[in-house]
Image: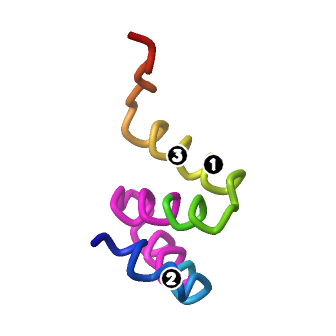
Amino acid sequence: MGRPARCRSRGAEAETFFVDELRDFPHNLTARASLAALYQSMGRTDEASRMAADLVRITGATVASTKP
């Protein structure tokens, strides 16, 4: 089970952990992805989208198409 799943019931505590981690290590992709997943699980879709966009910006990745 991933960290966001384990921390979901303690959302505020988990959010603080990931935000602090990103303040100290802004290119920590695992923390950024985990925070995005946490926000999504909490219904905070705008923040989740922002974190996902940051991941794309930082890595230079492109969004893959889901079309067959």
Q: Residue sitting at 42 percent across and 64 percent down?
A: 34
**Which label was assigned to residue 52?**
3
From this view, report whether residue 48 is shown above or below residue 54.
below
Mark 1 vs 3: CB contact within 8 A? yes
Structural crowding at the residue carrying mark 3, measured as other residues with C-alpha within 10 Å and reported as few (<14), some (14–19) or many (≥20):
some
From this view, report whether residue 10 is shown above or below residue 58.
below
Secondary element at tag 2:
helix
Amino acid type at circle 1 is Arg
Amino acid type at circle 3 is Ala
Structural crowding at the residue carrying mark 1, measured as other residues with C-alpha within 10 Å and reported as few (<14), some (14–19) or many (≥20):
few
**Which label was assigned to residue 14?**
2
Structural crowding at the residue carrying mark 2, measured as other residues with C-alpha within 10 Å and reported as few (<14), some (14–19) or many (≥20):
some
Residue 63 in the image: state x and y as whole percent: 45, 26
Q: Distance between the residues labelled 3 and 2?
A: 17 Å
Residue 15 placement, left or right of 1: right
Look at mark 1 in the image and give the residue it sits on.
Answer: 50
